[in-house]
């Protein structure tokens, strides 16, 4: 009987940083949540260990080889009853399965789009961490949420903060609710004060070492270039229907204020907390209630000071490129995102230098004709074209 009242959760990207934090919150509330499905790309050992703790009905991995590896591990540990699937179609199937109520979309990059969209089209409660999916498909994704009665809870800490600072009745009409501006805070990453002349020689290890947050490698590099903030400007535009010129980025190195909403009466509302993703995850899971996330209370006396400064677009050209792509519209944000994914991977693989990342993106945007995007096919076509152009650029 109590089992019936539990929410069934599917975690796309369970082995990643967000996936692990989500399971940490769920483990604190086994009376409220059951894990229906877990997915991982290649890390089968980690996934098998998660299965032993959370007993999903279904698991999805990236390939037949990974599925075989996982099967051996599950059989050996007495978990042969768990259904094993692999591939992109299986990701969409678990994200839209009738048994599932809540989908945590935490796959990194464009690879997460089809399954995130499938969850929206199946009318699920979608907890969106996978910002790249929204950047690529903004209009289509938001329309799918509305058309299928899905609910969208932003998990990105900034957007979760903004969501918390907007009225409950907010319906995508900022003017009717007196919203003047969105103030998106940014830590500035590990290179905020580094001599600009030395940026071309920084290593991947230096770039992934974020001062405040522990995250996956791709988003850590995005934080170092501030493309992460650029993607978040685009994400905020789609989530809250606010134009680019009313979304300001404010550097706030402590990452204690997670973002703010500025209202036309002069009020600015902020959400504060320790930088720990379990807070927005718990908020999304339990919304509109609040549950324990395992995060300690914020000690403002210990924090002492909160600082703010303007972003330097010369230091962080990726941020300017993202604003431009949003202004251009059409497929420009999709091209920006895809060429960034290629450039970041090339940097992590030691093929290009750090300061080449914005150059690859800028040149991809110059070379490719921007088109209108009407459906998933046209989005995936724009994504594929940008990947092929950027791949040529990084191998030159
Ligand atoms: P991560 O690299 O730690 O984990 C990525 C997950 O996606 C893994 O479970 C991996 O198995 C899976 N995956 C990777 N490639 C895949 C593919 N091709 N097909 C299917 N699955 C694949 O990343 P993360 O830091 O957890 O970030 C996940 C998403 O959440 C990203 O979009 C990121 O921008 C966003 N996000 C993360 C944080 C954070 O604190 N980590 C904060 C805000 C937003
Ligand atoms: Mg963020």
Image: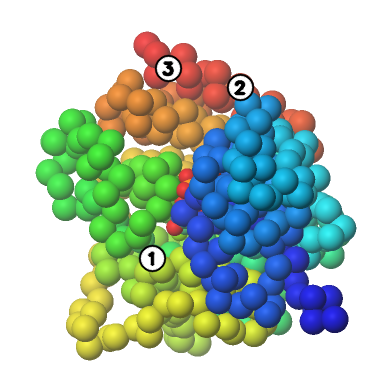
Q: Which residue is mark 3?
A: 393
Residue 371 visible in the picture: no
Label 3 Cα neighbours within 10 Å, binned few <14 / some 14-19 / many ≥20: some
In the image: residue 359, left or right of residue 137:
left
Q: Is residue 214 above or below residue 218?
A: below
- In which image quadrant can residue 218 be found? top left
Front position in the image: 134 or 112: 112
Helix, strand or loop for disc 1:
strand
The image's colouring method is: rainbow
Q: Nearer the viewer, residue 307 or 22?
A: 22
Drawn side of residue 190 relative to residue 389, left or right: left
User: Number of numbered discs present?
Assistant: 3
**Which label sits on residue 89?**
none
Q: Earlier in the sequence, mark 1 or mark 2?
A: 1
Marks 2 and 3 sit apart, C-alpha to C-alpha, by: 13 Å
Crowd tier of the residue under label 1, counting other residues whose Cα lies within 10 Å: few below 14, some 14–19, many 20 or above = many
x then y, percent, for residue 323:
47, 47
Which residue matches tag 2? 385
**SS at mark 3 in the image:** helix
Specify which label sits upstream in the sequence, 2 or 3.
2
Q: Report the residue marked by disc 1.
A: 185
Q: Residue at 55% of width from left, 18% of height from top?
A: 388
Q: CA distance from mark 1 to mark 2?
A: 32 Å
Marks 1/2 in contact by CB < 8 Å: the verdict is: no
Q: Is residue 96 left or right of residue 246?
A: right
> Which quarter of the rendering shows the N terminus?
bottom right
Identify the secondary structure beneath mark 2.
helix
């Amino acid at each position: 009987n109590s089992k019936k009242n539990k929410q069934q959760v599917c975690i796309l990207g369970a082995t990643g940083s967000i996936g692990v934090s989500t399971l940490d919150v769920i483990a604190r509330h086994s009376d409220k949540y059951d894990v229906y499905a877990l997915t991982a790309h290649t890390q089968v050992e980690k996934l098998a260990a998660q299965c032993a703790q959370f007993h999903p009905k279904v698991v999805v991995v990236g390939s037949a080889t990974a599925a075989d590896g996982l099967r051996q591990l599950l059989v050996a540990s007495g978990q042969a009853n768990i259904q094993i699937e692999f591939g992109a179609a299986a990701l969409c199937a678990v994200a839209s399965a009738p048994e599932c109520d809540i989908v945590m979309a935490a796959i990194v990059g464009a690879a997460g789009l089809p399954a995130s969209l499938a969850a929206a089209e199946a009318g699920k409660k979608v907890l969106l961490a996978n910002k790249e999916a929204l950047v690529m498909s903004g209009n289509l994704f938001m329309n799918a949420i509305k058309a299928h009665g899905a609910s969208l809870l932003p998990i990105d800490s900034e957007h979760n903060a903004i969501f918390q600072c907007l009225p409950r009745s907010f319906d995508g009409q900022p003017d009717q609710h007196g919203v003047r501006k969105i103030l998106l805070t940014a830590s500035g990453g590990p290179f905020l004060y580094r001599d600009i002349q030395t940026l071309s020689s920084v290593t991947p290890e230096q770039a992934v070492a974020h001062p405040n947050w522990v995250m996956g490698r791709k988003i850590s590099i995005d934080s170092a270039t501030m493309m992460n903030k650029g993607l978040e400007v685009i994400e905020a535009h789609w989530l809250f229907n606010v134009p680019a010129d009313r979304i300001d980025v404010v550097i706030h190195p402590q990452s204690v204020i997670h973002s703010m909403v500025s209202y036309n009466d002069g009020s600015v509302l902020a959400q504060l907390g320790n930088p720990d993703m379990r807070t927005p995850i718990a908020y999304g899971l339990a919304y509109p209630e609040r549950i324990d996330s395992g995060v300690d209370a914020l000690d403002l006396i210990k924090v002492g000071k909160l600082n703010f400064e303007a972003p330097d677009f010369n230091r962080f050209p990726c941020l300017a490129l993202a604003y431009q792509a949003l202004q251009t519209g059409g497929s420009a944000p999709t091209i920006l995102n895809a060429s960034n994914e290629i450039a970041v991977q090339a940097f992590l693989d030691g093929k290009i230098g750090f300061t080449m990342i914005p150059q690859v993106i800028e040149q991809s945007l110059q070379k490719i004709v921007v088109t209108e995007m009407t459906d998933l096919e046209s989005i995936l076509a724009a994504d594929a074209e940008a990947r092929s152009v950027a791949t040529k650029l990084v191998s030159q």
